[in-house]
Image: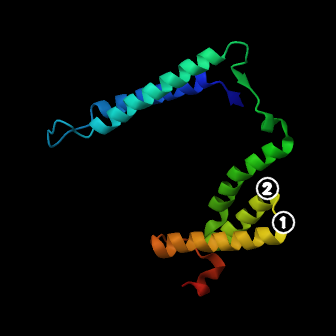
Amino acid sequence: MKFNNLFRGLLFLALSGLVAVASWNLPNPSQQPLGPSAFPLILSGLLALCAAILAVGGARATQGSPLVGRADWARSGGALARLLLVPAAVIFYMLFAETLGFLICATLILVILFLAGGTRPLQAIGLSLAAALVIHSIFYLGLGVQLPWGPLEPLRW
């Protein structure tokens, strides 16, 4: 779907109102003049200003154009299928990460996504293996996040 900026502006305006309401009465245990609610209130004010600018620009652009329409890429069935691959990949990872481990799941997901994007098969496999190893190293070795190993448990480093 392709929405006019009027809808986006109104959505962000509502979001800024929610942030302001949620942060208005945050407790201030140290009784400082600028307590915990100051920063979220400033951000919600800036978000409201940007949202209003976006909504006004969208309202001006509505003359002669529809408020809601389909984007050009959404007219292709292949593009929609590729778009749905992303949530399918997340669901696949959630279901099989413990069983297969991070490295296998990530490699399979990336190979499928690369192939769907038009990458050559050997290149997709190589890039997927390299990306999975780099991502695993960053999280496992660099950040200390315990990722599942699955059948590769004996090769744990």
In this picture, is 55 found above or below 111?
above
Choose between 134 and 90: the one closer to the eye.
Answer: 134
Image location (x, y in percent) of residue 139:
51, 69
Question: Which residue matches tag 2?
Answer: 117
Image quadrant where residue 16 sits:
top left
Q: Position of residue 153 (x, y in %)?
A: 59, 82
Query: Can residue 27 be seen?
Result: yes
- The image shows residue 126, relative to residue 11, as above or below, that is below
Which residue sits at x=49%, y=76%?
A: 141
Label 1 residue SS: loop
**Residue type highlighted by circle 1:** Arg
For mark 1, does the 10 Å Cα neighbourhood hold few (<14), some (14 to 19), or many (20 or more) residues? few
Q: Residue lying furthest top in this view?
A: 63
Look at 14% across and 38% down and name the residue there.
31
Q: Is 147 above or below relative to 64?
A: below
Marks 1 and 2, how far apart at CA: 9 Å
Residue 100 is at least partly visible in this image: no
Query: Which residue is under mark 1?
Result: 120
Q: Residue at x 59, y 76 (%)?
A: 149
As drawn, the residue found furthest toward the bottom would be 154
Number of marks in the image? 2
Q: Which quadrant does the C terminus fall into?
A: bottom right
Query: In the rendered image, which quarter is residue 37 located in?
Result: top left
Amino acid type at mark 2: Gly
Q: Are marks 1 and 2 in contact (CB under 8 Å)?
A: no
Residue at 84 percent across and 66 percent down: it is 120
Give x and y (percent) for residue 143: 45, 70
Where's residue 105, x and y in %? 68, 68
Q: How is the image coloured?
A: rainbow
Q: Is residue 50 left or right of residue 39?
A: right
